[in-house]
Image: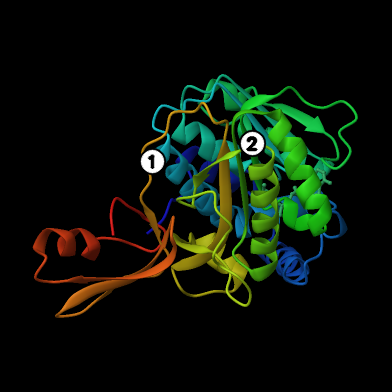
Amino acid sequence: MGARLPPALEAAIEQRLVGVSRADLAERAARISGHYRAQGASSAVVRAEADAAAYALSRLPATYAAVDAAFEAIAERAPEFAPATVLDIGAGPGGASWAAVEQWPDVVAVALLDSNRAFLALAAELARSSDHPALAASRPVLADFRALTAPPEPADLVIASYALAEVGVSDAVETARTLWGLARGVLVVVEPGTPAGFERIAAARSALIADGGAVLAPCPHAEACPITAPAWCHFNRRLPRSRDHRLVKGASAPFEDEKFAYVALARPDLRTRGAGERVMSTPRVTKVEAAYRACTPAGLVDRRIPRRERERFVRARRLHWGDWAEDG
Ligand SMILES: C[S@@+](CC[C@H](N)C(=O)[O-])C[C@H]1O[C@@H](n2cnc3c(N)ncnc32)[C@H](O)[C@@H]1O
């Protein structure tokens, strides 16, 4: 099971929802989800703080799990990366910043940038409940990321989580380039694991490599992406659903699967662990072998590790889709 929300965040959301009608939240959450599925932007559907709260209950656990997985991949490749400052662009209720301080507790300053007042107000309210001093004192910045007339301070870690989905592909690429200019260490872009999400990730990846970015994750190389339409690169995180989460989604399963796509780029001087390959499918283990698809510097490769190669087989059997494999 993937990451669950930090208890303090879960409690702060619960606290925010005391006395709020679950039927009203469910109605708002359904409207917001339908709007996102039709690739609409938040501004048309998240107008009041109650809408932002419905998002926090229904979508934040999944976007948190996705961004947490991307952070784990960054930490795995760059164990020495220890950001002091975080800039969370299109922060919404701020879940990505909560995940950042969980992964890198030495953060000393967090800025939450969004163009939506309802989201920013909720993000600030939730952040105040954190026992992490930098998150509790995080700075809300009301701004449009496509037109940063007064650009925010650069930061060691710049995050755009499920934010570039809200603008067209060319705006998304231009924004990614602006954000790269603000990233002193790492820029990570996370998007829904859909063809449209991956289109933005792939376009941002190419542009940022051209601008000098070193690919940290998920790709084990900076060559042209070997995944082309109709396929799309994405990963999956399974996350637990709380009772309220189930209620508001009208769902009965105690978990959900969040599909996401991402790319993390680093300044070339960041020390990283050597190249390996990325597991691109759920390994299939049979009596004779473990088999999975891997993204490697030489492109996509179907790995088949025979059971008789005991050590390699045992390692392969333990792999999951999205894992970093040391060798093929
Ligand atoms: C789907 S929400 C994602 C929120 C959060 N980052 C997460 O991962 O849960 C997209 C966020 O991007 C913000 N956003 C969209 N377009 C924006 C823009 N042009 N400038 C600033 N924020 C924007 C929205 O207001 C919203 O908060």
Q: Position of residue 193 (x, y in %)?
A: 59, 64
6 is higher (above) or lower (below) than 304: above
Mark 1 element type:
helix
- State the residue at coordinates (69%, 63%): 199
Near-viewer residue (145 or 105): 145
- The residue tagged 2 is 212
Q: Is residue 246 left or right of residue 316?
A: right
Point 69% across, 38% down: residue: 211
Mark 1 Cα within 10 Å, few/some/many (few <14, many 20+)?
A: some
- Amino acid type at image mark 2: Gly
Are discs 1 and 2 less than 8 Å apart at CB? no
Depth check: 327 or 45 in front?
A: 327
Q: Earlier in the sequence, mark 1 or mark 2?
A: 1
Determine whether the residue tagged by mark 2 lies in a helix, strand or loop: loop
Asked if ligand 1 lies within 8 A of label 2, the reply is no
Q: Quadrant of residue 16?
A: top right
Residue 20 in view in this figure: no
Q: Nearer the viewer, residue 51 or 190?
A: 190
Q: Is residue 327 visible?
A: yes
Determine whether 123 is above or below 298 in the image.
Answer: above
